[in-house]
Image (tube, rainbow, N blue to C red):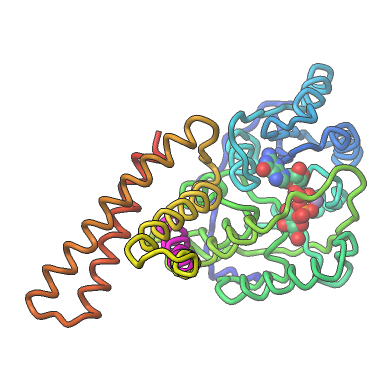
Amino acid sequence: AVTDAALGPTRSRPLAEAAPGAPVLTVVIPCYNERANVAPMVARLGATLEGLEWEAVFVDDNSPDGTAAAVREIARADRRVRCIRRVGRRGLSSAVIEGALSSSADFVAVIDGDLQHDETRLPLMLAALREGYDLAVGSRHVPGGDSEGLSGAWRHRLSNTGIRAAQAILPVPLTDPMSGFFMLPRPLFEEIAPRLTSQGFKVLLDIVLSSPRPLRVKEVPMRFQPRVAGESKLDVLILLQFGALLLDKALHGLVPLRFISFGLVGLLGVGVHLAALAAAGAAGLTFEAAQVVATLVAMLANFGLNNSITYRQDRLRGARFWRGLGLFVLVCGLGAVANVGVANVIYTSGGGWTFPALLGAAIGMVWNYAISATLVWGR
Ligand code: GDD
Ligand code: MN
């Protein structure tokens, strides 16, 4: 933990005096299909935070299991409990951010809704912030903490790899940058919020990397409990988003994340194109015919991948999917014309082979990205 007073004061203005009964601490609880965990969560918070003015904000992305209804039922009997139900959206980071932004308390904490985090650490975290720390983090990797609840050797290895990757670009030392259990002063969060990337699973990392100045961090040992009900939402796409988050922060947000993703998908598309070309050739098609087939296959693959990775949070479905695919093929067709056209102009003015080809491809990609971002996936 960093205790360097030279980092200067972080709280620019003292908070206005809170009325009696106003929450001092907002606990934000992201949840997706956690219905069975809602009531135990509220009961545990009540026990741990006895004597403190607190509130719990559950942020649910319209879970099919009726998590929101379970929260509301409790909220009708207990004024400390609220539900934010988001419709047509998914995402842990953005859920956490929106929950925290709904707070008027002095402090905001974030804890998983599946009871895997140890809520009895909350008073300790609060005490650290009152002592002047900017951020308190539940860590599995300080003495007294553990990650027993992480199921399987591969989850451990994955987690450790992610931690090492994150530590390479962290401005402050953190033993568990992947933790989803933390607390910070609400005004500080509000200051950082507009800078957040807000995609993916790792909002703490996003906060630390987006802060305008290094934060003074207190790490609190945490035992990561095994999950009892429901299941984990971690998947391959979330890992890709994690890589993208690190890349975005390493580039200081100069290049839009979606452009990078679009470019990577485009590179993959080149591989798809070559594979399809070879297959069509083997099936006896002429070069020209095989090229047409391969181009269409690559466009289809690019559209599908961009729709589920690059635009995961605004994914097109049903009729909008097919309309989007049609538009995408049109946009990329024009992009290909621009690509070849530019390359030809430079080539005929004596630019060799490589430079015109690369410039043409770059212009085609920027065109495809810019136009499809507004026309295909824009609203
Ligand atoms: N609203 C909302 N929307 N909530 C979500 C979403 C979503 O798209 N995806 C996941 N959640 C909720 C889950 O319901 C759970 O309460 C919490 O976010 C964490 O999700 P899990 O799926 O249980 O994550 P995990 O157990 O694999 O990961 C945990 O370990 C990481 C460290 O390895 C979490 O604690 C992470 O926060 C932590 O960083
Ligand atoms: Mn979990």
The answer to which quarter of the image holds residue 85 is top right
Q: Is residue 12 visible?
A: no
- In reply to whether residue 168 is colored magenta, the answer given is no
**Left or right: residue 239 compared with residue 27:** left
Q: Is residue 195 visible?
A: yes
Against 86, is 350 above or below?
A: below
Residue at 38% x, 45% y: name it: 328
- Percent across and percent down for residue 99 are 64, 37
Residue at 46% x, 49% y: name it: 303
**Main secondary structure type of the part rendered in magenta:** helix
Q: Residue furthest front?
A: 284
**Left or right: residue 302 compared with residue 32:** left
Residue at 47% x, 61% y: name it: 265
Depth check, front residue: 284 or 119: 284
Depth check, front residue: 289 or 360: 289
- Percent across and percent down for residue 245 are 54, 61
Stretch in magenta: 257-273
- In reply to whether residue 259 is colored magenta, the answer given is yes
The answer to which quarter of the image holds residue 289 is bottom left
Residue at 72% x, 67% y: name it: 176
- Percent across and percent down for residue 349 are 7, 76
Against 100, is 87 above or below?
A: above
Depth check, front residue: 63 or 279: 279
Against 166, is 372 above or below?
A: above
**Left or right: residue 278 compared with residue 2:** left
- Percent across and percent down for residue 347 are 14, 75
Q: Quadrant of the C terminus?
A: top left
**Left or right: residue 337 compared with residue 125:** left
